[in-house]
């Protein structure tokens, strides 16, 4: 028998779910023709919406749950690893992003692999490695992490009365419905709303916590006194150096962020993406990672007797401070943070599998069948991601940093060399991608040790070295090939 409190929580949650689906329906009515409109809105999203969507998509469930939980278990060092990403995002978005945007506009790209296939005149290796290994395999656990995070919110606020598995399934169905309805427009519109909700939650909780403890200094004094582990650094220094380098140079290499470059209406949108991403990062690091990390450390000093896993402790703090009903209202912002990333990745994975894998076999042939396949793939991908969320064994941030980011950052050496060193050729890229991806997968599987480095560091460096060496030993791209890619897209001035 579900109590009236849990019924009220369900009512609040389903109200949010209904709003997401309504936005999906609204986007469905606004959609244009063609598969490119479904996947990247035909490059028509303006700068205001783009600022919101990059802020929301760049910071997922870990912005509210995983970040404070990571500080609780690993000290303040890990959350500080966000800083290179924040500032690198501005540089990479404006410099590298502008070139990707122009190429996307001129050649009407849909997936990240489209960019590499055109630049290097190589279809099979680039589409299989980038489209399947990086975009598809690398994203499954990322989607799982978001489903887990949103489910943690509801089960935590109900005191465990609402069971994990049914709520997990409801979250998955919600994503499928509004993404399949409205495509990228639905994702962009809900992201904007979710960015606002996430911001209000993060800032609001931090302000209340600081007030309850009598100020910032008192909050931290209490946290350090009761839970000294928050000031420790349990991660090797070499991990921070290697991850920081990847995070600074590779923010837009995340495929779900990459496709937003194609969706922009103009270069002004890139500036909005840079500003939106930076502002979101500052809010998350200051108010969520550090302030809420200190708050749960002071409130639940003993992990052994804490009411739940570290990622769920912000929910339990809100439950004790606000009660379940108001807590549910507030924590729709946490679900928004999770949904805003999961929906983007879900759509991107569908497009990659459809265009990069099935497209290699020239199927499906008609526009109608392409749309049907796109929606079927959205359902299939969420089904696979559900499996990863059935029995979570690690924290949200650790899941994405250990299993997803190493593959995502594999795009970095290929992109930077392909854009700024014109001798880079298909032989080097093919060899680099195969070698780097193989090593990275073996590191993720535990076959090759990390030696204390970031999981993807060895594979990414190997990829870069192989690209350079093989490109030097094999024929350079012809002037015609380079002209078709670089000079023609240079005419784009929007």
Image (cartoon, helix red, strand yellow):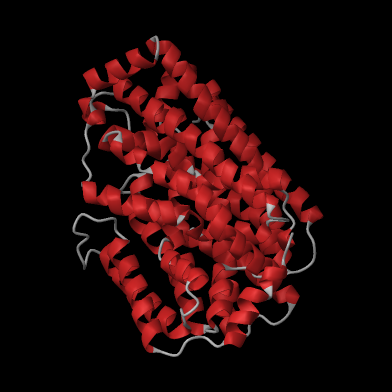
Viewer-nearest residue: 162 or 184: 184
Q: How many marks?
A: 0
Viewer-nearest residue: 391 or 365: 365
Q: Which x, y percent locates residue 29?
A: 81, 54
Viewer-nearest residue: 455 or 469: 469
Q: Is residue 1 above or below residue 462?
A: above
Answer whether residue 94 is visible to the viewer in this image.
yes
Left or right, residue 235 beside residue 59? left
Left or right, residue 434 beside residue 205? left
Image quadrant occupied by the C terminus: bottom right
Query: Residue lying furthest bottom in this view?
Result: 475
Query: Residue lying furthest top in this view?
Result: 214
Q: Is residue 332 above or below residue 452?
A: above
Q: Which x, y percent locates residue 157?
A: 46, 29
Q: Is residue 211 above or below residue 397?
A: above
| Residue at point 52%, 86% (across, down) | 477
| Residue at point 41%, 81% (across, down) | 428
| Residue at point 39%, 37% (across, down) | 67
Left or right, residue 217 beside residue 19? left
Answer whether residue 377 is visible to the viewer in this image.
no
Left or right, residue 19 beside residue 164? right
Q: Which x, y percent locates residue 277?
A: 54, 43
Viewer-nearest residue: 367 or 392: 367
Q: Which x, y percent locates residue 112?
A: 55, 68
Q: Could you say which quadrant of the image residue 448 lies in?
A: bottom left
| Residue at point 30%, 20% (across, down) | 298
């Amino acid at each position: 028998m579900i109590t009236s409190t849990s019924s009220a929580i369900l009512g609040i949650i389903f109200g949010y779910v209904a709003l997401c689906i309504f936005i999906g329906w609204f986007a469905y009515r606004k959609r244009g023709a063609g598969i490119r409109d479904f996947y990247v809105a035909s490059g028509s999203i303006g700068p205001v919406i783009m600022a919101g969507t990059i802020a929301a998509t760049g910071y997922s469930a870990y912005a509210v749950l995983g970040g404070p939980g990571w500080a609780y278990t690993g000290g303040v060092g890990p959350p500080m690893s966000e800083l290179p990403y924040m500032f690198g995002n501005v540089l990479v978005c404006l410099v590298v992003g502008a070139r990707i945007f122009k190429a996307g506009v001129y050649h009407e790209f849909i997936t990240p692999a489209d960019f590499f296939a055109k630049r290097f005149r190589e279809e099979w290796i680039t589409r299989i490695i980038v489209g399947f290994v990086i975009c598809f395999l690398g994203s499954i656990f990322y989607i799982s992490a978001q489903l887990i995070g949103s489910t943690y919110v509801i089960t935590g606020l109900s005191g465990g009365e609402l069971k994990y598995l049914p709520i997990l399934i409801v979250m998955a169905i919600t994503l499928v419905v509004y993404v399949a309805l409205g495509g990228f427009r639905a994702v962009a519109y809900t992201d904007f709303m979710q960015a606002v909700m996430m911001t209000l939650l993060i800032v609001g909780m931090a302000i209340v916590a600081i007030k309850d403890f009598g100020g910032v200094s008192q909050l931290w004094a209490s946290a350090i006194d009761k839970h000294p582990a928050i000031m420790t650094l349990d991660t090797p220094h070499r991990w921070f150096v290697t991850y920081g380098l990847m995070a600074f140079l590779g923010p837009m290499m995340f495929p779900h962020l990459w496709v937003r470059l194609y969706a922009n209406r103009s270069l002004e949108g890139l500036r909005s993406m840079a500003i939106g991403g930076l502002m979101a990062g500052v809010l998350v690091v200051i108010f969520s990672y550090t302030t809420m990390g200190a708050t749960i450390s002071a409130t639940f000093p003993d992990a052994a007797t804490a009411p739940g896993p570290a990622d769920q402790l912000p929910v339990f703090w809100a439950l004790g401070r606000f009660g379940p009903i108001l807590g549910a209202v507030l924590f729709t912002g946490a679900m928004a943070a999770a949904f805003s990333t999961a929906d983007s990745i879900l759509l991107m994975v569908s497009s990659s599998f459809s265009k990069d894998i099935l497209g290699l076999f020239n199927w499906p042939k008609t526009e109608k069948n392409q749309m049907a396949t796109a929606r079927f793939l959205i359902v299939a991908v969420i089904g696979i991601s559900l499996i990863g969320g059935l029995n979570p064994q690690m924290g949200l941030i650790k899941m994405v940093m250990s299993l997803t980011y190493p593959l995502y950052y594999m795009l970095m050496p290929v992109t930077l060399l392909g854009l700024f060193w014109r001798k880079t050729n298909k032989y080097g890229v093919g060899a680099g991608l195969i070698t780097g991806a193989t090593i990275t997968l073996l590191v993720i599987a535990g076959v090759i040790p990390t030696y204390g480095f970031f999981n993807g560091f060895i594979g990414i460096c190997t990829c870069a070295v192989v690209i350079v060496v093989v490109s030097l030993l094999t024929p350079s791209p012809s002037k015609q090939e380079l002209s078709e890619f670089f000079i023609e897209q240079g005419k784009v001035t929007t």
